[in-house]
Amino acid sequence: MPELVLRPAVPGDVSALTAVQLAARAQAAMPPGVHPPDEVRAHLAARLRDSECWVAETGGVVVGYARFTRTWLDDLYVDPTHEGTGVGSALLDVVKARHPDGFSLWVFEQNAAARAFYAAHGLLEREHTDGSENEERAPDLRMEWSPRTVGGSP
């Protein structure tokens, strides 16, 4: 496998980010997205202006990305053909390094694989909702990473 390269996203990456997100969501145990591809692309293009975003590339191809703000990890998607290869872990490590004081994220309750991934990386479940506040109207939960809770009690 070619070397994994992590780098900040640039506007020219938006199409690749869109493709990764759509492919990952289609394969994940989560509700279908409510936006068509052109709206996802427009949303990501706009968010690159007010969020930090890092991509993972192998062989010059974007295979995953993480988009985050100072306190929230908004997106972490890996192309399904690269799941289990360390791409998600590498991207999560970038987020932890960029925000060492901690951050939160939302994950769908039904997405057991994502929940297990985040738990294995030290995130704790903090809040469960009925989904009435998200676009998909599906139960979700807030997970949190904090250096204060890693390896210890909350």
Image (tube, rainbow, N blue to C red):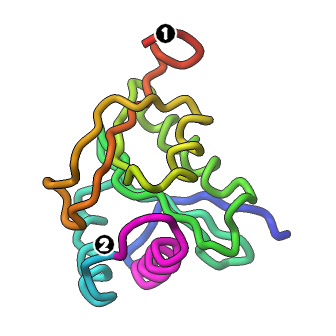
Q: Is residue 28 magenta?
A: yes
* x and y percentages locating residue 97 in the rendered image: 52, 35
Nearest the camera: 38 or 80? 80
Q: Label for residue 153?
A: 1
**Residue named by callout 2:** 44
Q: Residue at x 19, y 58 (%)?
A: 134
Q: Residue furthest top?
A: 153
Q: Residue at x 30, y 65 (%)?
A: 48
Q: Residue furthest left?
A: 133
Magenta stretch prevailing secondary structure: helix
Q: Quadrant of residue 129?
A: top left
Viewer-side label of 1, 2: 1
**Quarter occupied by the C terminus:** top left
* x and y percentages locating residue 13 in the rendered image: 45, 77
Which amino acid type is marked by label 2? Leu
Relative side of 138 to 93, left or right: left
Q: Residue at x 36, y 69 (%)?
A: 31
Q: Secondary structure at mark 2?
A: helix
The magenta region covers 12-32
Q: Is residue 30 magenta?
A: yes
